[in-house]
Image: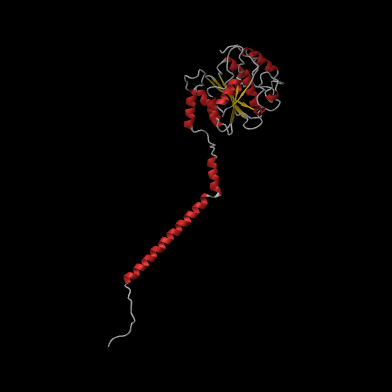
């Protein structure tokens, strides 16, 4: 008897069932991985555009390193500046003198105010070593000062007219002693000074600054009618003692300290008790500010001024 029932049975092999489950697992794993990657990308994008990171980017674009010059750079600058070359006949400072001055600049709290009398072979070096502070140069030659600024726009230089003569140094020191309670007192605003040794034709703002380091390396010339450096030394002494704020002490360096005219002038106004070191051509003084109304440059000075010869000896 023939079976007329059309019902059919489909039997799935266990292997086929397992294969379908495996595909679903792989699809689920792929979707999970894609979702995780999308979330990570979203988080990273939001962090990279956050205000904190934006400030970091801005700080990079306006980068200013507050740290001192690295020692290798400092060493290279000192080596370059103290190495003679055939393109100039100007005297160069010795390596020992350069290191002494640079050490004071590196110890100076930022921003450091550096005043230099004289434009020289080392001018660019001083400006570089004091890269975090303000460096001002004073020179007696207005044309050279203007030319130097034109060639080096980063240099701040001013010219000054000296009214002194090297041959008159002894008389000028004696006159300053007599006027130490009036025009030539050690604490005053030189802008209004009538002392012949005081430089009062600089820009007004320079008299308001508290100078941390002062280098007397000018004016040039050691003949009888040359201005000599007594006026620059006196001005440095008054500026150091008349500070209103900042560090109470000022490092004052006198180059060519080995010459009698500069040594006598320095001992008169910067004083022996303030002399830290004198070696070779450099004298190093540390001068403290004084109270208003002080009338004596040195505590231990009793001898009269020493006559100064009108020569470079």
Q: Residue furthest left?
A: 1
User: Residue 113's x, y, as percent?
Assistant: 60, 30
Label count reads: 0
User: Residue 162's x, y, as percent?
Assistant: 64, 18
Looking at the rendering, which quadrant does residue 16 occupy? bottom left
User: Which residue sits at x=53%, y=19%?
Assistant: 281
Looking at the rendering, which quadrant does residue 134 occupy? top right
User: Residue 256's x, y, as percent?
Assistant: 55, 18
Q: Is residue 187 visible in this depiction of the protein?
A: no
Q: Is residue 151 left or right of residue 301?
A: left
Looking at the rendering, which quadrant does residue 277 occupy? top right
Q: Residue furthest right?
A: 182
Quadrant of the frame with the N terminus: bottom left
User: Which residue sits at x=52%, y=51%?
Assistant: 47
Quadrant of the frame with the C terminus: top right
Q: Is residue 47 visible in this depiction of the protein?
A: yes
Q: Is residue 182 left or right of residue 142?
A: right
User: Residue 143's x, y, as percent?
Assistant: 59, 20
Q: Nearer the viewer, residue 66 or 267?
A: 66
User: Which residue sits at x=37%, y=65%?
Assistant: 23
Q: Is residue 263 left or right of residue 14?
A: right
Q: Nearer the viewer, residue 135 or 303?
A: 135
Q: Residue furthest bottom?
A: 1
């Amino acid at each position: 008897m023939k079976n007329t029932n059309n019902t059919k049975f489909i039997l799935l092999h266990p292997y086929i069932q397992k294969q379908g489950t495996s595909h679903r697992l792989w699809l689920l794993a792929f979707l999970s991985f894609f979702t995780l990657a999308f979330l990570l990308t979203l988080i990273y994008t939001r962090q990279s555009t956050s205000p904190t990171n934006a400030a970091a980017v801005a700080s990079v674009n306006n980068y200013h390193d507050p740290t001192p010059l690295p020692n290798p750079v400092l060493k290279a600058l000192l080596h370059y500046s103290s190495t003679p070359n055939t393109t100039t006949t100007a005297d160069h400072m010795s390596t020992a003198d350069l290191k002494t001055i640079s050490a004071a600049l590196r110890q100076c709290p930022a921003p450091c105010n550096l005043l230099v009398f004289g434009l020289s072979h080392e001018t660019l070096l001083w400006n570089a070593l004091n890269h975090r502070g303000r460096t001002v140069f004073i020179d007696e030659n207005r044309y050279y000062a203007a030319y130097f600024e034109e060639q080096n726009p980063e240099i701040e230089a001013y010219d000054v007219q000296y009214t002194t003569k090297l041959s008159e140094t002894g008389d000028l020191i004696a006159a300053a002693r007599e006027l130490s309670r009036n025009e030539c007192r050690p604490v005053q605003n030189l802008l209004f000074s009538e002392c012949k040794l005081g430089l009062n034709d600089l820009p007004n703002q320079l008299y308001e600054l508290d100078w941390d380091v002062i280098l007397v390396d000018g004016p040039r010339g050691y003949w009888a009618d040359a201005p000599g450096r007594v006026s620059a030394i006196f001005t440095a002494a008054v500026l150091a003692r008349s500070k209103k704020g900042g560090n109470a002490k000022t490092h004052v360096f006198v180059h060519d300290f080995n010459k009698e005219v500069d040594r006598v002038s320095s001992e008169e106004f910067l004083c022996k008790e303030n002399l830290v070191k004198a070696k070779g051509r450099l004298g190093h003084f540390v001068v403290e500010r004084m109270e208003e109304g002080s009338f004596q440059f040195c505590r231990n000075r009793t001898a009269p001024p020493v006559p100064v010869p009108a020569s470079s000896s």
